[in-house]
Amino acid sequence: MQTSIEFQNVSRHFGEVRAVDDVSITIRQGEFFSMLGPSGSGKTTCLRLIAGFELPTAGRIVLGGRDTTNVPPYERDVNTVFQDYALFPHLSVVENVEYGLRMKGVSSAERRQRALAALEQVALGRFGDRRPSQLSGGQRQRVALARALVNKPSVLLLDEPLGALDLRLREQMQVELRQLHRQLGITFVYVTHDQGEAMSMSDRVAVFANGRIEQVDSPRNLYQRPQTRFVAEFVGGSNVLADALAETVTGERKAVSVRPEHIRVLASEIALPDGHVGVLGRLVDIQYHGATSRYEVEVDGRIVTAALSNRDDGADAARIGQDVRLAWPSAAMVALVA
Ligand code: ATP
């Protein structure tokens, strides 16, 4: 069975702290759904609410059409993979994976067979006899995954599961998690503060700030159509032009977002190209990033960033300290609602 997850005006307050504040979302069955936001924004509390480790202060959580308010964690068709893995060091890998089934009273033959099948799913079929201490970080991570999968849950909750791994391994595991998700067809709910990770893996992402949801959308829409300043800046580091700067380029004082890759850096005496708007400023820094260089330009005391492709490997478009004209197509601006 597969399960959708509905938050209906859910709040979880701890005294004065509004960890989760009036959140309503529907996570579709079979979806790879990420909760993205800075530290303390309420993501983990939302995950714990789904698992039943926390109860809402207000609102309802509905799993697969069923109100879960009075359903204890072990009766929910949900399993969690934590960042710290929490493996038992004195048990072998296969015993670690079997452990939950043993607690449920599953027979020893069935336990072993299901544990080995779960280890196969995470490509650790040959590692059952080892101790956790004899595995790499990435392999331990997979054991933690197998331990959740052995219960055949309809929903897998993942709380920053790759946080302890180095960059290369993290990227490899991101690909594997996507494959596993496709193969299993169950709902994944993934918590991360890493926007690149959320964007590359998810069908949809909920962006959190201060216990509230700023926007729920596909990665592409979040990037191309951010609705709020927070989303524009947090996802992909866009430029938000507000107040007088917005008025200069749009004629209105409403904030707009412009992605760095849409901005060109021109000599200040060059006229604006057709269909473009722009501002004058002074180049204060250039950061080399391989595929692109980021040009930081001070405009009326604010920094606007342009990302220029290094494809042609030409000389820098300008020198630090020089006056420059920034120009971008009018159509590249996205109006923000908040
Ligand atoms: P992180 O990425 O750092 O884990 P998060 O976005 O997952 O952050 P939460 O762990 O959900 O954030 O915490 C949200 C807020 O609620 C924080 O201010 C946190 O200090 C507070 N909080 C969480 N759990 C409790 C608790 N049991 N008692 C008191 N405050 C709590």
Image (spheres, grey):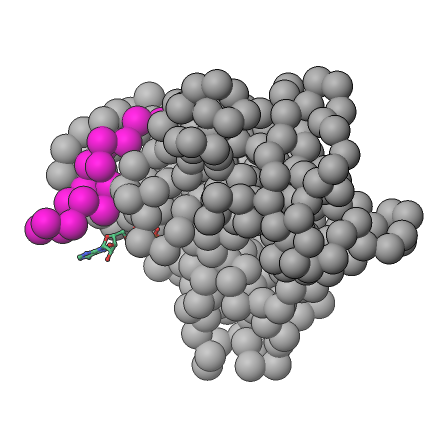
The quadrant where residue 51 appears: top left
Depth order, front residue of 220/9: 220
Does 16 lie within the magenta span?
yes
Q: Residue at x 54, y 25 (%)?
A: 249
Q: Residue furthest front?
A: 269
Picture coordinates of residue 238, whole percent (x, y): 55, 40
Whether residue 329 is visible here, answered yes or no, is no
The residue stretch that appears in magenta: 10-25
Q: Is residue 125 left or right of residue 150?
A: right
* Quarter containing the C terminus: top left
* Placement of 155 over or under 74, stated as above or below: above
Depth order, front residue of 268/105: 268
Q: Is residue 85 left or right of residue 295?
A: left
Splitting the image into four quadrants, where does ligand 1 fall?
bottom left
Q: In this view, does 68 lie to the left or right of 126?
A: left
Picture coordinates of residue 79, whole percent (x, y): 41, 48
